[in-house]
Image (cartoon, rainbow, N blue to C red):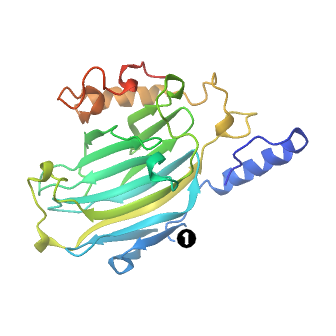
Amino acid sequence: MAPALPCRPKLRLLCVALAFLLAVDMGRADIYEDLEIIWSADHTYYFMDGESEALALSLDYNRGSAFKSKEMYHFVRVDIDIKLIEGNSAGTVCTVYTISEGPWEVHDEIDLEFLGNSTGEPYTLHTNIFANGVGGREQQFKLWFDPSSDYHTYSIVWNPKRITIEVDGVTVRTFDNNEDQGVPFPSYQRQRVYGSLWSAEDWATQGGRVKTDWSQAPFVSYYRNYNVTWCQPSPGVLWCGTEPAESTHFNLSPKALADLQWVRDNHYVIYDYCLDRSDRYTDATRPKECSLPPRP
């Protein structure tokens, strides 16, 4: 992995070269070589989907299936193509996420969960972010396409300034680093990539009102084009973790800002914890980041 601390001055050039080589080496990944099945190998299979190697996860009444990355990462971009369950997917949850592996009470996690639905009803993309063991930062989206008819690319971009979630290159969500304002942010722990397909019929579809039709099992989702790119710092900076606070290197691009506005203008955001006016929060308990201005 890329070095986590600055080198001594005499070794600086060597360390910069090493960091560069490691970054180049981690500029891509292989779904067969770099992922491993961790749950129900007999419910998974690899196959060639056109010119791409793909991984299928399946779910039946007895159990689902899951994979994880062999490597752990610290500040990274993860891209993966997913084709979700076709037809009636009510009660199912297909995921891709990153998570740390230290003590659970201080764990970090970046979640993308696709909540299934009845035939003809749209999927819900459920996102959440945990930092230092604290989650509850849910945003949910409806997608502007049918995610079961073809593959689409879902991306987690994690750098020291923010976390960004993209769908087919469209920025749908950001979570800024406001540690200087007392808001936890995943800064210090490496994370591993996971993906899974499992049953959550007690809550996943319309709050659990619609149950899984197990006569339609096995349910299958497909993953391909897994790609990992180490975070690249600005020129002259050893690695992303030492990027100066005043740097504009990780500022949002005009396109990303336009994407975020487009997603909201077209009502693709269907839940935002910061805008929740139910009895979940009072003005005193609403998360602090909800009242802070967005970072550039």
Tell me the amino acid under the disc marked 1: Glu
Locate residue 34, reporting x and y percent: 54, 66
Neighbour class for label 1 at 10 Å: few (<14), some, many (≥20)?
Answer: few
Residue at (48%, 34%) from the top-left corner? 184
Q: Nearer the viewer, residue 139 or 172?
A: 139
Quadrant for residue 216, please give it: bottom left
Quick check: can you spot residue 150? Answer: no
Residue at (35%, 43%) from the top-left corner? 128
Residue at (33%, 26%) from the top-left corner? 261
Q: How many marks?
A: 1
Locate residue 177, reporting x and y percent: 50, 30
Residue at (67%, 50%) from the top-left corner? 23
Indicate left or right for 216 with 21 as reference.
Answer: left
Against 262, is 86 above or below?
below
Locate residue 142, reporting x and y percent: 23, 42
Locate residue 288, reporting x and y percent: 39, 24
